[in-house]
Every structure is written in C-alpha cells, then in structure tokens.
Amino acid sequence: MKYQIVIAGFGGQGVVFLVKVLAICAGNRDIAFLGTENHGMSQRGGSVSCDIKIGDFTNPVIDKNQADLMIALEQNEGLRNVSYLKLDGTLVTNAKDKDDYPKLPFKGFAKIDAFKKAEAGEFPIQGLNVYMLGIALATDKNFPFSVKEVKDAITQMNAKVAKQNIEILDHAMRDIKEL
Amino acid sequence: MKQTLMGNDAIAWGLVHANVDMVSGYPGTPSSEILGVVQKIKHQLNLDIYAEWGTNEKVGFEVAYAGAIAGKRTCATMKQVGLNVASDALMSASYIGNLGAMLLISADDPGFHSSQTEQDSRVFAKFARIPVLDPATPQDAYDLTKYGVELSEKLQIPVMLRPVMRVCHAREIIEMDRETNFSPNKGKFERNVARWGAVPRDGRFAQGVEQLNRIEVIKEYNWDTLLKSEFDKCMGKDTLIITSGTGYGFVKETLNDLNLEADVVKVLMPYPLPVTQIHKRFKAYSKVLVIEEPYPCIEEQIACDKVYGKNTDTVHKIDEMSKEAILNALSNINLYDGENIYKTPPSLNFDVEARPPALCPGCPHRDVYYAITKVFKKKKAIYPSDIGCYTLAIAQGAIDTILCMGASVSMASGFSLSDPDKTTVATIGDGTFFHSGIPPLLNAIYQGHKFILVILDNSTIAMTGRQTTPSRSNRNIDIKKIVEGMGIDCIEHHYSHEMQDNIDFFKKVKEVHKSATGPTVVVVREFCILDRERAVDYVPGIFAQVDADKCVACDQCTTVYKCPPMAYNDDGKIEIDPFLCAGCGGCLDVVCPTDAFIQDFDYLKRGK
C-alpha cells in the first residue's frame, strides 16, 4: 500500500497530534510510515502543514500533485496547500458555511463549518483536529485505517483524554452522514 | 524493537544506547528536542546522565569536549548557526582530539524554515577536518548516532552528525535496541600537557601533521567500511547518482515515480571522501550526478568533467530538496525528457492571504514593543533587535535590524556612534542576553556608548520550546545583578496588562537616558504565555470583545498592535476570535483610538 496525506492548519490547532495518531495506526499494523512535522518558528500561529506517507517511501515530504488525501483544519490553509493533492484525491476541509468556497476538481470532497460547531459548544475547540479526522474517516473510502484502528491509536496516544476524543470522532462521523 | 519516533527522539535513544552520559548544548530549531528527550529518558530509566543546556553553544561544546578528553562518551547538540558560535573550540579540538568519544550534532535547516542562514555543517566539518555523518531518515539518525560515537572513540577525534530538519522532524517506525544496558565510560583525566595543552608552534604543528595523516586514514576507512560496498552494489547503468542524507530518499522516489534507471550510491560519510577510489569507479559511467543539500560538499571533493551538480548549474543551489528539483536535474543531464508530474493545474494555485508566525495572543512582548514605539518614535529612533520569539515584533514595526545572537547590543553601540542624532533602543531576550549579550554590554559600558537596552526577561528560551535559562535553574541568576555588577544601574519594570503603565515606564526611561553618559539598561520582567508554570499567575483572564458601534476600521490594531485574534468581519468591523483570545486584557487600554475594545464578561459562558 502507498498512501500520502497532507494535514494543513495553523500553529496551535494540533496538526502534529494527528500525525502521531496516524503513525501509531501504521505501527500497530506494522506498515512503514514516514512523516514530517513543523516545529519552532513555524509553530507561532503561522501556517503549518505536515506530510504523512504510509507504505514504501524513502523521503518524508509530499511533492505537488501527489497526495491522496488532504485534511484542512482551516479553509485558507487548505486552499494554500491544495496543489499537493492529486486530482483523483480527496479534500476534507473545515470551511465557513458560505457560498463563496471555490469549486474544486477533486474526486472526493467534504466541507464542514467546524468552527461554527465548536462555537456552538458541540465540542471543545481543542478537539477540532480530531473532529476533522473523523470527517476524513467517514468521507475517504480509501482511508488506510479503520475507525477501530484510529480509536485504538487515540487511546494509546493519551488515555486520559481518549474518551472525549473518541466522542468527538463519532460526533464528526454522524455529522457528515447527516450532511 | 520497533518504535515510532521523530528523528530527534531517535538520536536521543541512539546516544543512550551508545553509552553517552554527558550531553551539553544549546537549543535551536531543528536540534532542540534531542537534549530534552535525553533528559526524559534519563528520568524514565533512572540513568546517571549529565544532560543540561549550556549558556551558549561554545560553552556546551567545551563542557562535552572536556568530558571526552577525560575518557567519557559525550555529545554536544546545536543548530547550524550555533556551530558558528562553537566553531572556535571545534577548530582546535580537531587538532587535539579526545580519548573517549565526542559526537557533535549540528542540525541543518535547508529551506530557511527557522534559521537566518542555509549554511551546510558538512562543509564546516570539512573546514575543521573532522568526519561527518549524514543521515537520510530517523532510522539512519539512530544508527549513525551509535556509529558516530564508536567512530569517535576509535579515531580519537570528534565526529559530527549532521541531520537536516527533514530528519530531525521526520517521524518513522524505527528498529532500535530492545534493551538499554547503560554502561558509560568512567571519567579519568590523564595529564598529558604535550597533547591537551599543546602550544604554538611546535606542539600545534605536530598535531597539524597528525590531523592531515588522520584524515587520510579516515578516507581509507570510509572506502573500506562504507563506500566500497555501495559501489559494488551498482548494476552498471549509464548514469551514476551520488547522494547523501535526505537526497537519497528524494532520488530513490523520483527515479521510481519517473520509471528511470540509474545507479545510486548513498554516501553516509560525506567528508572525508576517498577521491581516488571513487574516481576509478567513474570509468563505467557517462555522467555522474551529485544530489545533496544545501551546499556542494561532496561535489567539490569529487569534481571532474563527468560530475554534474550545483556548480555546473544542473541542480538547484538554494532552498529545500524536492522531487521536482530532482526531476529538473535529471532533465538537465538528459536522463528524463517527459512531463513534470509534480505540477498541478494553475487553477489550483490560490492566492491566499499569508499567515506568517506571530507573537502569541497574550504575549507580553507585544505590549512592551507597543509601548516602546509609542514613546520612542520611529523617525527619531533605531531599533536593533535579536534572535528569539520577540523577533516576531518585526511585524509591529518595532525592529530595524537582526543579525545573529547577541548582536543587538553591539550593533546598538555601532548605531549610537554612527548616527548619534537618533535614540537607539535595542531589545534582547533573557536567553539571548545570557548566550552572548553580556560581552557587548561590557564593551558598551566601558566605552561609554549611549543607547537604551531593553532586556525582555520571560525566564525561558521560548521560541525553541521553553528550555530553562540560567535565571531559573538551581541558582536563579538575576539579570539585574549581572548588570549592576558591571557597575551601572538596571532599571526594573514588571510588565503590566494595563498599557499605560508600560508607556509611563518607558517615558521615565527616556528621561533617565537624556542625561546618561553610557548605556541605559532596562529589564522588563515578563512571562511566556505558553509557560504553564508561570503564566497562570500573571494572565488576568480579561477577555476582549469589540463594540462594533465604536470601531471605525482605522487599522491601528491590525497594523501596530497585531494580535492574532483581531480581524475584520464581513461588516467591515474588527472582531475578536474567541478561540484565540488569551484573556491578557492588553488591548483594552490605549491600543484602540476609539476605545472599541471592551471586556467580554460572557466569555467563559461561550463554550470555551
């Protein structure tokens, strides 16, 4: 299997948390994993994008037109990085409920206003990363890991907050079905 | 045992598994996590390890190096520009050598992600005549850390490990030792003045001759144990690609993506190279392409008319490696003539507003810089600054120059001498002041240079992950006393979330400075908003909202104060993003000319 995922957001949104969760998923199934993260200067609220390559790869960076999936934790950060996604890939993005979102040519697509949901108290803002992961899980039929595998990894990451995170994941998967 | 690790985690485990029990260094992205993870492993496994930050890279290097002279296995960690600071010690250590082992880790940052230069530490190793190892992945980083420590003890010379950001901050499932049987060398200094205290000319000349001979021995060793088997694996293709570090991973994937064939040699030790043996192997090829980053280190050692690389304009010369850059290089040597598969339709290039890094919401630096620019007006001031989080105040127009660690103070001297009609107001963080701000301040005091120095003391090295500063570990060294010890006053101010307090303070400083005959030094006691230990005691929890009727869209807050939660909404009024506001209350006073920022008493009820 070869699968490449870009996660885009800004500093403080917990992009690296998602990288770690997916790395644990790969480790549990003994599939090769190579990813790259942003630390340091780029963390101070600036644009952050992390690359995750699952399967037989030798460098951690995703080039343009290569990613199978992009999870965008914020609308503009998604658009900024959209050229890394293959045309037959899937874009999952947090974006405002407005009509001005551009029409994009990707095969798979899901858009949801996660900020609005967090503001309405449906989940805490710190869980927006996990919420969008749930949207991706429910949208991308080729997603390399099962819901159970992701939940197990979330529990391994931090057992203390696992219950809340798993609830957010389930919440997201219900929301996307209702869309 | 399989483990999912980031490159810097892998290096830390490699050090422990190589029985290194002294680690010293200075934080700097992308190297910072290495020492911190060693500290974690030390506590987790209850190991007797010295793993502490030095006051700067030179100090860190020298502590570790002395340990290696005394027979221990040691390590110094830093980023590539930190090596500039430690280079004085390195150049001599390479003549003198060591009895135990010393691994020097200098992490490079191709692509300028978090660095002011894109310099190549491998070239520095070549300059210093020590061997350098170049890992391609976290697995390599683990393996080469252990290998480098062994090699240093065997050769009795410091060995450099040079990971780049895409190794340090890459994450991978790696295979590492199951057991940690930690058995460090016992330190025992053996007096040998002729070696450890060698003086010019005879002593150092003899060591210089040894150094040259040693490099020849290492070249042979590089060939026999690392390179020969790589060349022996080659399949007799028409093109040979020689690569090291991340270059290897990019080359392999690009060849695979493009369905191309070439022999690929991965160089683990890019210096010193056994050039004669390598050249003999060139006979079988029509072209040799060198892929490495960021400088042409291998290329310049093996240059001949078959070699293509940066110096022949075949390969990109600046910025990070990408498969697209490799594709272009393969096109340039006529190995590939197909389309660029690493391109998406131009319709997908969205012109999205940039989101540069910014001072965090609630960061006291923002308010202090705001107050400084209010009191010392731009037209009549020069603002030299330094390296740290506070560099981000450049977005507030509060910084004019950035050079390197500590330069704010010495450049303030230079500006005050060369343009005395303006007031020079220099800013430096406490970490940087300890690192290299003290000698230039001494200089300014005894020379009588008239400028204002503001030391922003948040008692942490914030930018690189909040490592401890000397003001906070063991003895709580106080900056004010250091300055007073140099024979001048140090005016102290405690940051206030009420802006007027900060402005009043700097007005007072301005008055004091008028009659000064030398530098006026100020320490502003702050905190880092991300510092869980201290921030809770200081953040007042006053959250802001905007009175839309009062907002006249004047841009003051978005251009001069620049707090990330502030942005225009669809109605053309400023709105505070409730997810980002830190509750510092800093904007409620002075910042808005129409007083549109008001306290949001309902903040906590809105599902935070």
Image: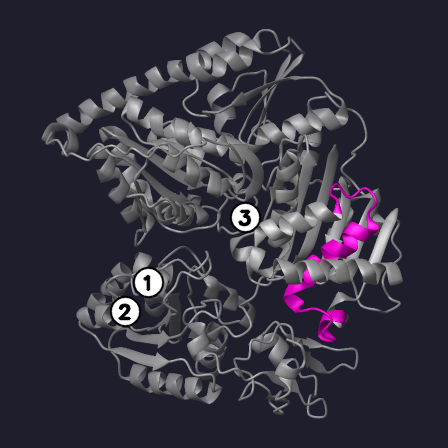
Residue appearing at x 38%, y 66% in the figure: B428
The amino acid type found where label 3 is placed reads Phe
Circle nearer the N terminus (1, 3): 3
Q: Is residue B103 above or below residue A111?
A: above
B121 horizontally vs B249: left or right: left
- Where is residue A111 shown, x and y percent of the image? 83, 60
**Magenta residues, start to end:** A117-146
Circle nearer the N terminus (2, 1): 1
**Render colour scheme:** one colour
Do discs 3 and 2 share a chain? yes
Count of picture labels: 3
Q: Chain of mark 3?
A: B
Quadrant position of residue A88: top right
Q: Main secondary structure of the magenta part?
A: helix
Mark whose residue sits in front, 2 or 1: 2
Q: Is residue B177 above or below residue A11?
A: above
Mark 2–mark 1 contact, CB under 8 Å?
A: yes
A121 horizontally vs B13: left or right: right
Q: Secondary structure at mark 3?
A: loop
Q: Which residue is mark 2?
A: B479
Residue appearing at x 58%, y 74% in the figure: B563
- Where is residue B439 shown, x and y percent of the image? 25, 59
Circle nearer the N terminus (3, 2): 3
Q: Secondary structure at mark 1?
A: helix
Disc 3: CA contacts within 10 A as few (<14), some (14-19) or many (>=20): some
Give the distance between the C-alpha atoms of the residues marked 3 and 2, in whole angstroms: 32 Å
The amino acid type found where label 1 is placed reads Phe
Residue B579 visible? The answer is yes
Q: Chain of mark 2?
A: B
Q: Which residue is mark 3?
A: B112
Quadrant position of residue B67: top left
Mark whose residue sits in front, 3 or 2: 2
